[in-house]
Image (cartoon, rainbow, N blue to C red):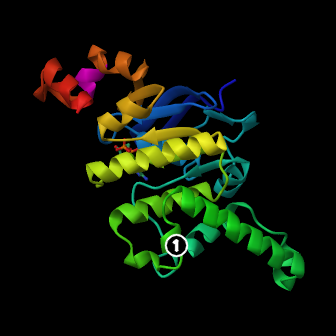
Amino acid sequence: MPLLETVDLSKSFGGLRAISNLNINIEAGSIHGLIGPNGSGKSTFFNLVTGVYQPDPGSKIIFNGHDITKSASHDIGALGIARTFQLLRLFSEMTVLQNLMVGYHTHVPYGFMSTIFNNSAVVKKDAETKSEMMELLELIGMADYADMPASELSGGQRRLVALGRAMAMRPKLLMLDEPAAGLSPVNVDNLLSIVMALKQRFGLTVLIVEHILKVVMETCDTVTVLDYGEKIGEGSPDAVKDDHAVIEAYLGQEMDDDEVRKAFNS
Ligand SMILES: Nc1ncnc2c1ncn2[C@@H]1O[C@H](COP(=O)(O)OP(=O)(O)O)[C@@H](O)[C@H]1O
Ligand SMILES: [Mg+2]
C-alpha cells in the first residue's frame, strides 16, 4: 500500500487547471521526485496535499490509510506530513533552537489546560523536547548554532534549519519544495547527504520537488513528471530522462535531445 495516494486529483484557479486528474502513488520508504517546467503544478500539488488549497470535487487524497482530501493543514501535520516551503519562512528573531521548538509545538500540541497551568509535567516535557531538538540539530550539523538568531544565518544554514523545523514535526512523509535552490554545489551535496541520513534514522518517506535535475537523478527512486498539471511521465530517473515526451515538455524546443540529456546529467 502506498503511503500517499492521490486519485483524480484536480485543482482549478478560475479557468486555469493547475492540476488535472492526477494519480500519484508514493511508496513508503521511497524518495519520490516531482519535476516539470515552471508553472507545471508542482507547488500546487504540495499545497493540495498539505491542506493549504482545497482540491476540486471528485478528487481524493489518501495518506497512511486516512482520507485527508478535506482535512485542515494542522490535522494533516498531526497525521505525519511535514513540508518545507519554496520561499523560506523562518522566524528570524528567534534562535535556531526556538525555530525547531515552534515546529514541534505546532504539530505535537500539549493539552490546552496543561499549557495554561504550566505544570511540572509540561516543564519536564519541555526538557525532553529540547534534548530531542538538540539531537536533530546535531543530525543537520547545526548544533553549534542553536542559540544564534535565525536572522544571522547564511542562506545555506537557513535551508538546513527549515529542514530541521519540518523534521521537528516527526513526520512520516517529508515534502521538500526546491530544497537546493540557490545553494552552492558543496551545500547541495551536504543537504542531500543530510536528507539521506534523516531518512535512514527515522525511516522517512521523502517527496522532493527540485529544479536541479542532477539532484533528482542522484537521489530519487521514482520520478513523476508534470506538464500543465498532467502527469506525462513516471518511472526510475534513468527511464524518465530517456523518455522523449518528458524531454520535449521539460525543456521545450530550444534544445535537442542530446542537450537535454546533458542537463539531466550535470
Ligand atoms: N493561488 C493561485 N491562484 C491562481 N493561480 C495559481 C495559484 N497558485 C498557482 N497558480 C497557477 O497554477 C499553475 C501552477 O503553478 P505552480 O504549482 O506554482 O507551478 P510550479 O510549482 O510547478 O512552478 C501556474 O499557472 C500558476 O500561475
Ligand atoms: Mg513551485
Magenta segment includes 243 = no
Q: Is mark 1 within 8 Å of ligand 2?
A: no
Residue 27 location, quadrant = top right
Residue 173 location, quadrant = top right
Q: Which residue is mark 1?
A: 96
Residue 101 lies, with reference to residue 119, above or below; the image says above
Q: Amino acid at mark 1?
A: Val
Q: Say what secondary structure mark 1 lies in.
A: helix
- Give, as a single range, the part of the protein colored magenta: 246-250
Q: Mark yes or no: residue 32 visible.
A: yes
Residue situated in front as seen by the camera: 14 or 52: 52
Q: Residue at x 36, y 46 (%)?
A: 189
**Residue 92: where, in percent of width, then height?**
45, 77
**Residue 177: where, in percent of width, then height?**
43, 48
**Residue 78 falls left or right of residue 140:** right
**Residue 252: where, in percent of width, then height?**
19, 28
